[in-house]
Structures are given as C-alpha cells and as structure tokens.
Image: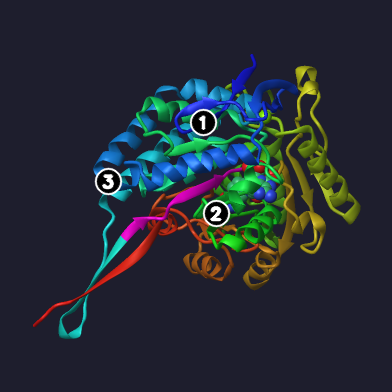
Amino acid sequence: MTRQVRHFIGGEFVDSLSGATFESISPIDNTVCAVVAEGGVEDADRAIAAARTAFDEGPWPRMATAERKAILHRVADGLESRVDEIAEWETRDMGKPIAESSTKDVPRAAMNFRFFADYASIAEDQAFHGPHGLFTYTRREPAGVAALISPWNFPLMLATWKAGPALAFGCTAVLKPAEQSPVTASLLAEVCAEAGLPEGVLNVVQGFGPEAAGERLTTSPGVDVICFTGESATGQKIMAAAAPTLKKLSFELGGKSPNIVMADADLDRAVAGSVEAAFRNQGEVCLAGSRLLVQRPVYDEFLARFVARAEDMTIGNPLDRSTRVGPLVTVEHMEKVLSYIDIGQNEGAKLLTGGSRVTAGDLARGNYVAPTVLADVDNSWRVSQEEIFGPVQVVMPFDTVEEAIALANGTRYGLAGVVWTSNLDTAHRVAAEVNCGTMWVNCWFMRDLRAPFGGTKDSGIGREGGRYSEELFTEAKSVMTQLAH
Ligand code: NAI
Ligand code: MG
C-alpha cells in the first residue's frame, strides 16, 4: 500500500512547483510506503506566505482564546477518531511498534492539542503597581509565523508538541516533518482541515533540510520563530542560518543521558525501568538513558538481570501487537548503529548480548538490530560520548555518588538523567548536581506537560512545556500608564 503525500499550503493539498517527489521507505521491509512531494525553496516560500497572510490578515491571532480552544479540541478529537489508521502509518513509515504508536504516540498527539488549548485559555497576564500612580500590565501577543522542524523518531508526537502550543498561543505555522517519516504530518493536516482550522494557520511542507524546504524556513524573513528538534549539528547550522534575520529559537537536540543505579535501589524497578530507558522505540529516543552507571556492589547482579530482560524483548514486525523492538528507521541508520557496536568492541567493551542484525525469516528484509549491551566501558570512549540512537546500551561501574555525578556530567550533552535509589538525600543530591534539563527519580520518560522540557550544553536552547511554550510562541509587551492622582 503506497500513499501519495502532498504539501498542505493555505488549506489546500498541493504538489511541489517543480513536480519533484521522493520516496519514503518502510523500515519493515525496505519497500516504498509513500511517494512524497519534495519541497524546494519555492514551496517553503509559498507555505511561509500562506502562514504570513493568515497571521497578518486572518482571524486566527485575533480570535478569542475560547474560540481557538474549541477548534484545537476538534483537532484532538479528529486525531483520536482516526487513531488506528494514524498509528498504522506511523509504524509503517518509521518502524515504531504499533503497541506504542496506537496507545502512546497518537493519544499524546491529541493531548498536545488539548493541553495547550486549555492552557492558553487560562493563561494570565501580570500587573505591576508602581509608585506615584505608575501602573503597568503585560500582554502576551502571538509571536508570528513559526517554523516547526521535527525529527523522525516520534514524528506525530513531536510535530504536535510544536504545533499544539504554536497554534494555541495564536501563531501560524509551517511544519517541516523529517523526510524519513512524512506521512503522519500529512494526516494531521487532513484532520486540521476537517476540524475547521482556518486556511494558512497550519501549513505542512515536505522534503529535505539542506538547500531545500527545511533550510529556507531558517533563512526566510517571513519566519519569526524556529522550533526545532533534531541533531545538535543541525541545530548549529540552523542557528547560523537564522542569525541574519535574528529569529527567536528553541532547540531540543541530542543526548547521552546517564542512568544511575545506586546499590540501595529497588532493583526490580531499576531493572525494568532501565531496560525501557535503553530499548524503548529501538533506542531511537533522544531521552534514552543511554549511559548506564551501576554502583559496584550490585554491578554483576544488575547486569545479569538487565541482560536477561533485554533478551526477553520481542523483536519483530512492528505491526504485530506483541512486538516491543521494531526495525531502525533506515538502512543507513542501522549501519551507523552496527558500526558503533564494532567501535565499542574495538575500544574494549565486553559484548554481553545482541551485537548484530536480526534476520530470521521476513525480518531479513528490514532493519532489525538485537538489543545490545556493551559492558565495562570507559566514559571517554566514543560509544560513551557519541549518540548512537539505537538499541545499544553502554554500561560502566562506579563506587561513590561523587564519581557517578562526575561521570554523568562528563559529556557534551545535558538533556536528561535518571537515578534509581531508595535514599531520599541521594535522589535529590543527584537530581541537583547532574547538569541537564530533566531528571527522573525512580522512573523514566514520565512527563507533566506544564513542566519545562529541554536541554543544557549541546542538548538544546530554551525550554518548552506550559508557560515555557507560551514564552516561546508569544512576545511579552509592557503597557505603562501614568495615572493622575
Ligand atoms: P536531523 O537534525 O537530521 O533532522 C531533523 C529535522 O531537521 C528534519 O526534519 C530535517 O529534514 C531537518 N533539517 C536537517 N538539516 C536542516 C537544515 N540545514 N535546515 C533546516 N532543517 C534541517 O535529525 P534526525 O536525524 O532526523 O533526528 C534524530 C536526532 O534528533 C537525534 O540526534 C536525536 O537526539 C534528536 N532528537 C532530539 C530530541 C529532543 O527532544 N531533544 C527528540 C528527538 C530527537
Ligand atoms: Mg519512512
């Protein structure tokens, strides 16, 4: 089943002006699953112009928040009513197990619209009462046209994590989904059209980044805000490209997050949570606890249990409900992941399980890699420092909490961290001293959409979530009044 995917510009589904297309390949069997309009600079320009007109002249930024809220809830309803179809396309397009796309990604996409629609409708302004009758209040005004550039690992979830707040706070937007996973953004566009979103408010332009639609979104004077999730190196390029037009930026980038297991942890919970933190979504998770640090007294026991549980995960066709580990997004990405397994062993890591492709039966046609554990690594090695973004867990022992914190902070990244402990003091000390944007204590991947989300160091710029998204997608204005007394 091959789908035709077009751009969505000014409320219409359209082809590229050049007529160019590209193929999206399913990692399940490396067959074509979609033929997609390939957006060039001129297509991005059309989408930006549509968003610009909708912002400068259309009803959206001027609408009462209650009215916007009703429309955005209809978008959420539409996503929920098509959950099976959308989840299946997400899985086909990028390989995520359907058990997750149908119960997590699509419901969360709907929640991204609902939460921010509600949040924007109750957002408050500030007032300052100064001396001598000086009275100041703030207004939060929509920031303009937002470029939303998203990656392939959580395509719809991250597209809506950007589009939900952008629209809720009154911006108009151009979404550029990743070229590896274009389909669900197009389904989102269908849902928005059915929900009565005014034309030009959300535009979707498909295609690649460099010298194409993606890059144009970062250089066009018609774009006010860039909200980007992807690789740190891409973030650097976008920041440079956006400098001449001084755009507002929010970047969520890569990670190599420490997952710290203290000897006093509840090992049942720590093992179960750590396996998820390593191998959920085939390890294609920016927030993965991809560096496992285990305190020496429990190192051997923990690792034995971790490996046994990893080996229990069902690897298979992600369209099967029982699959927990699906294929990696592309052949090139699989080869990159496999090359890191070699690099790690050459550096001296001990391979405890996995280490190769899984090619049994039909799986030979897809990009399957077994959950892999590389133990006894040194934190300075490439496998400890570089983002592998696949089902490859590196593990190292430590003795003291000070040592764990130093190891945790010993990377260029600062996205997230995890600590498993039954000691309250240790939990909060580690939470305070690990340099990152999100810390989890005795859990992983939990979120509260009101809380800030983002990274330090090379993992990002800015925060999103709740009022942090409001700050991104609005401009604060002070109105000062001198009252005569
Ligand atoms: P990527 O950076 O290659 O691509 C992300 C998006 O940027 C795609 O839509 C791509 O077309 C676009 N793009 C690429 N070059 C561009 C340019 N010069 N100008 C404008 N747009 C451009 O990342 P990829 O490989 O798709 O995603 C995986 C990466 O994303 C991983 O490194 C991962 O850590 C990171 N990521 C971070 C998350 C976070 O929240 N911090 C969440 C998910 C992924
Ligand atoms: Mg694909």
Identify the residue under disc 2.
Answer: 221
Q: Earlier in the sequence, mark 1 or mark 2?
A: 1
Up the image or down, 476 lies above or below 304; here it is below
Colour setting: rainbow
Residue 141 percent across, percent down from the top left: 34, 57
Residue 269 located left or right of residue 31: left
Identity of the residue drawn at 56% across and 67% down: 430
How many marks overall? Answer: 3
Say which mark, if any, is on residue 299. Answer: none
Q: Residue at x 73, y 60 (%)?
A: 397
Q: Return the residue nearer the eye: 265 or 315.
A: 315
Residue 6 visible in this rendered orientation of the protein: yes
x and y percentages locating residue 443 in the rendered image? 51, 50
Residue type indicated by callout 3:
Thr
Residue 8 disc label: 1
Instruction: Nearest to the eye among marks 3 and 2: give it.
Output: 2
Magenta residues, as a range?
Answer: 140-151
Q: Quadrant of residue 167?
A: top left
Taking the spot 64% from the left edge, 35% from the top edge, the residue there is: 39
Q: Position of residue 471 (x, y in %)?
A: 41, 59
Q: Which mark is residue 65?
A: 3
Q: Quadrant of the C terminus?
A: bottom left
